[in-house]
Amino acid sequence: MAISGKKPRKKKQGWVRGDMVLGRRGSYKLVNENNNKKEEDGDKRSNYAVTRFFTAGLGNVPLSPLLHPKEVEEEEQVSSTTTPKTAILFQPHTGKTHQLRVAAKSVGLPILGDARYGGGRVVRASDTTEADFDRTYLHAAAIQFEIDNEEVCIYSPPPFGHLFSTSSELDDVFVGMMKKHCESDPILQHIDGRSML
């Protein structure tokens, strides 16, 4: 689950696929697989990333009083990248470094608090002059896997961070998205009970 300060321009749901290529300053970028025909299949597939995503608008979810991007004069508007606009639910099908953050950027929805990929900087608690974000607003809410022939399911709602903890409306949006798009019955049962597995 993630929060972006932008609204989707094109797709509100779909797939993000491509090669994860290391760019400048340790950032990754997503490259269309057709651009890499010269690479051998083995090399290309080792960096191939696949993510499914769903979005929901956040409407008028209030910005926490603890989370002001910087001091602005009354007539100035808060930047669109600093106000929660879109909730994003990711279903990663591969596990590459920075995969979800790069996928969010590639569909025009950088995650709030993600300075590397355009979502705004995270400020240390001691810096009070320009308080942007207390964290990167990406949270692993649920996972299901099998180990030693036993199924393991974990569900952990995102109750921490200024945005996650101050808005029950935001929690309702995420729970609604999980109920609509999650394909795991054990996770869905615990979502209904709002308990951790």
Image (cartoon, grey):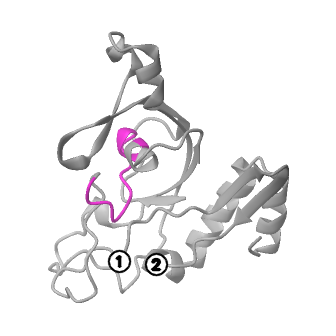
Is residue 112 found inside the magenta-colored segment of the image? Answer: yes
Which x, y percent locates residue 27? 26, 46
Q: Which mark is residue 99?
A: none
Q: Please give the name of the residue rendered at 46% of the width and 29% of the height, measured from the top-left corner.
A: 46
Residue 135 sits above or below residue 88 on the image: below
Dot 2, crowdedness within 10 Å: few (<14), some or many (≥20)?
A: some
The quarter in which the N terminus is drawn is bottom right
Name the residue tied to disc 1: 134
Q: Amino acid at mark 2?
A: Gly
Q: Please give the name of the residue rendered at 49% of the width and 59% of the height, measured from the top-left corner.
A: 2
Residue 29 sits above or below residue 59 on the image: above
Q: Please give the name of the residue rendered at 43% of the width and 35% of the height, measured from the top-left corner.
A: 10
Name the residue tied to disc 2: 161
Q: Nearer the viewer, residue 37 or 79?
A: 37
- Segment colored magenta: 103-116
Q: Please give the name of the residue rendered at 78% of the width and 58% of the height, measured from the top-left corner.
A: 152
Residue placed furthest toward the front: 148
The quarter in which the C terminus is drawn is bottom right
